[in-house]
Image (spheres, rainbow, N blue to C red):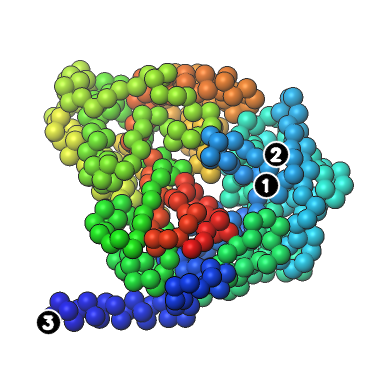
Amino acid sequence: MRKASLKILLLLCIVAFFVGCTKKEAAGVQTQDRDLIIATAQEPTHFVSLTATTSSDFDQMVIFAVQDTLLKKDWEHGGEVIPYLAESYEVSPDGKQIKIKIRDNVYFHDGTKLTAEDFRWTYDETLRFPIAPVLWINYDHTEVVDDLNFIIHLSNPYAPFLNILCSRVGPVMSKAYWEKVGDEGYAQKPIGTGPYKFVEVLSGNQIVLERNDNYWGEKPEFKRVIIKTTPDVNTQIMAIETGDADVAVGVPIDNLLSINNPDVVWDSTAANTTAMLWFNMMDDRPLIQDINFRKAVQYAINKDAINQGIYGGNATMIDIYGDIKFSGRPPAGTYSTYEYNQTKAKEYLAKSSYKPGQEFRVITWAGNVTEKIAQIIQGNLQEVGINMRLVATDTATFYDTLRNTGNWDAQYWTTGSSIMDMDSLGNSFLYSRYEPKFKDHIKYPQGERLDYLCRTGRVEPDPAKRIEIYREAVSIVNDEAYQIYTHVDVNTVLYRKGLKGIKADMVKFYRYQEWSY
């Protein structure tokens, strides 16, 4: 009786939580008359691409529904960049100009027609925000030719620039609307050209989007999209199982593996975030400067144990930066690599300057899957005789330690790439990106060569040549064991059986207009 009572109470809590959402209609009701209800653990908080702080991939669940990008990635054909709001595009031979012609049938949600001036304003305004130097590499200005044509000018070529125009900073915004409401007004009540209009946000509860019946592209099936903030994983899952929600985004793999319900389906895919152990190569760390010690750690990590123990075998394990879908990434078998080998780990450790019991201090984020994986690595290193001290902190303390104190031997974390290109490898190895107080003390053997390769790869227009450049770069990283890559994160989506057109996405860029029952 006690178990039955608890179950009834939990069901009542779920019903109460989802109050205000339209209950699923009886079988046979057309999709056009239904709401799409999505449960997500993290609340989207940024609804526009122009923002003073960096947005998260959960924000993209709103951004890409309300706003459209100029171009998009066609993952069905190897990640080719194809027109979206653009009707066509052409890159100049020197890679410094991109000529764009936009569609002539696109309108913002307030009825204002989209013109080339909106793109010029959006892209030029981006330079005001902190995201500009991180992603808008070599962007100079946009020249308006006429209402439907414009030219993007770069100061120098940047090979993955087209990827930027597909990313979370690529959506176009309305200049006329911004002139009425300003930054704050646009952020609170955004408009765009997308398939759904922004209606309201109830902080900590839900975000409501409404179908744009005048959408230029594929017409949305669902009347509204309601994104419910649902922090508890079990509540998310039960909402899908009972039909009180249609989709749950970001449910951990270990929870999905235990589901046994014929009415629900789940899918997973590699994310755009790379997990790695990154050594602190400051000159005041003699142990870390010892390549034999770094090699010992490299061979001691059991990636298969991470995959099976945390992801049930569903993760993509890697030896170099990024997912296989990243542009510029060299194919497997063409670069230097390594494998899990405790014998080799012990041999390198014996040759190193490591003293028995010496502390190897690794910092990570507390309270999430990253800490769990770091604990597995800690156990791996203990097995070969390395005393790894794991320091798990909150995010603010983690970054303060990383950027200001330098009190760490290595960090285990995940880092994302919005552009999904190997240029993001340079975020670690371009000397110009380091804080001045650290810059002169970073000692990477072959560091100048690696810096050169990262700089060359970002401007090389020939895809085949870029792959060869990054082949050499990642081989240096592996040979020197600067960073040890374990896997790319896993994005998941759990949904009601019968929902069509849905699958997990690398960056939670979901096109709700393609979904239907």
> Could you classify mark 3 by the number of other residues whose Cα lies within 10 Å: few (under 14), some (14-19), or many (20 or more)?
few
**228 sits left or right of 191 in the view:** left
Residue under numbered circle 1 = 84
Residue 217 x/y as whole percent = 67, 55
Residue drawn at x 39%, y 73% is 244
**Residue nearer the viewer, 235 or 400:** 235
Provide the secondary structure element on which disc 2 rests: strand
Residue 296 x/y as whole percent = 23, 25
Q: Mark 3 or mark 2: which comes first in sequence? A: 3
Residue under numbered circle 2 = 139
Residue 46 x/y as whole percent = 56, 61
Asked whether disc 3 touches disc 2, contact meaning CB atoms under 8 Å apart, the reply is no
**420 sits left or right of 265 in the view:** right
Q: Which amino acid does label 2 sit on?
A: Tyr
Q: Which amino acid does label 1 sit on?
A: Tyr
> Could you classify mark 2 by the number of other residues whose Cα lies within 10 Å: few (under 14), some (14-19), or many (20 or more)?
many
Residue drawn at x 31%, y 28% is 288
**Residue nearer the viewer, 283 or 152:** 152
| Measured Cα–Cα span from mark 3 to mark 2 | 66 Å
Provide the secondary structure element on which disc 1 rests: loop
Provide the secondary structure element on which disc 3 rests: loop
Let me know if residue 501 appears in the view. Answer: yes
Quadrant of the rendering where the N terminus is positioned: bottom left
> Could you classify mark 1 by the number of other residues whose Cα lies within 10 Å: few (under 14), some (14-19), or many (20 or more)?
some
Residue under numbered circle 3 = 1
Residue 44 lies, with reference to residue 328, above or below; the image says below
Asked whether disc 1 touches disc 3, contact meaning CB atoms under 8 Å apart, the reply is no
**Residue nearer the viewer, 489 or 477:** 489
Q: Mark 2 or mark 1: which comes first in sequence? A: 1
